[in-house]
Image (cartoon, grey):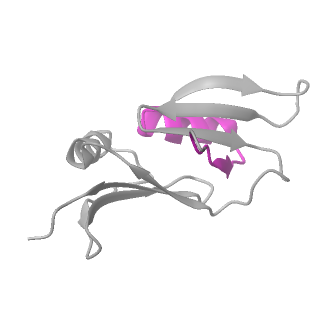
């Protein structure tokens, strides 16, 4: 029985990762781990809708992954992100032909998150 899925995204810069995931997306840092000082970072970030692992370890994941995260209020998420005026992303709100409203963002390392909410067809 599956209880949760926690994707692992490859990152290359701790400060840029925190700027994107914490400051822009509003995730919180749950914990950080390094085997020793000056070793790569492995950390968990979370929001009410999602838990992610972010890693600087080269063998853990490849950059350029994509995930889909279902949210309860896509319009509120879009308004919140648009209001932050993050200089590296200005995500739009898209109504898809497959029955969702979506807000897509790409982190500084090429990983993509597609936040979505199902919508009824007219």
Magenta-highlighted residues = 4-27
Q: What residue sits 27% from the left and 63% below the top? A: 100
Furthest residue toward left: 122
Q: What residue sits 41% from the left and 54% below the top? A: 89
Q: State the residue in front, 106 or 43.
A: 43
Q: Position of residue 122 (x, y in %)?
A: 8, 71
> Compared with residue 108, is residue 66 higher up or lower down, i.e. above or below?
below
The number of discs equals: 0
Quadrant location of the N terminus in the rendered image: top right
Instruction: Please indicate whether residue 80 sits to the left or right of residue 64 in the image.
Output: left
The image quadrant that residue 120 belongs to is bottom left
The image quadrant that residue 73 belongs to is top left
Q: State the residue in front, 115 or 92.
A: 115
Instruction: Please indicate whether residue 73 sits to the left or right of residue 49 in the image.
Output: left
Q: What residue sits 59% from the left and 40% below the top? A: 52
Furthest residue toward bottom: 97
Instruction: Please indicate whether residue 78 sits to the left or right of residue 36 in the image.
Output: left
Q: Is residue 13 magenta?
A: yes
Q: Position of residue 101 (x, y in %)?
A: 26, 60
Q: State the residue in front, 49 or 11.
A: 49
Instruction: Please indicate whether residue 113 sits to the left or right of residue 32 in the image.
Output: left
Q: Position of residue 70 (x, y in %)?
A: 38, 50
Furthest residue toward front: 1
Q: What residue sits 42% from the left and 38% below the top? A: 49
């Amino acid at each position: 029985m599956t209880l949760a899925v926690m994707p692992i995204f490859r990152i290359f810069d701790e400060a840029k990762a925190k700027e994107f995931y914490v400051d822009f997306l509003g995730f919180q840092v749950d914990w950080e781990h390094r085997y020793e000082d000056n070793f790569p970072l492995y950390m968990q970030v979370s929001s009410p809708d999602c838990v992610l692992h972010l890693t600087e370890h080269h063998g853990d994941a490849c950059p350029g992954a994509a995930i889909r995260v279902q949210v309860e209020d896509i319009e509120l998420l879009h308004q919140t992100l648009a209001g932050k005026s993050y200089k590296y992303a200005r995500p739009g709100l898209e109504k898809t032909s497959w029955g969702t409203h979506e807000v897509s963002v790409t982190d500084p390392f090429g990983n993509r998150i597609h936040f979505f909410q199902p919508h009824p067809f007219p």
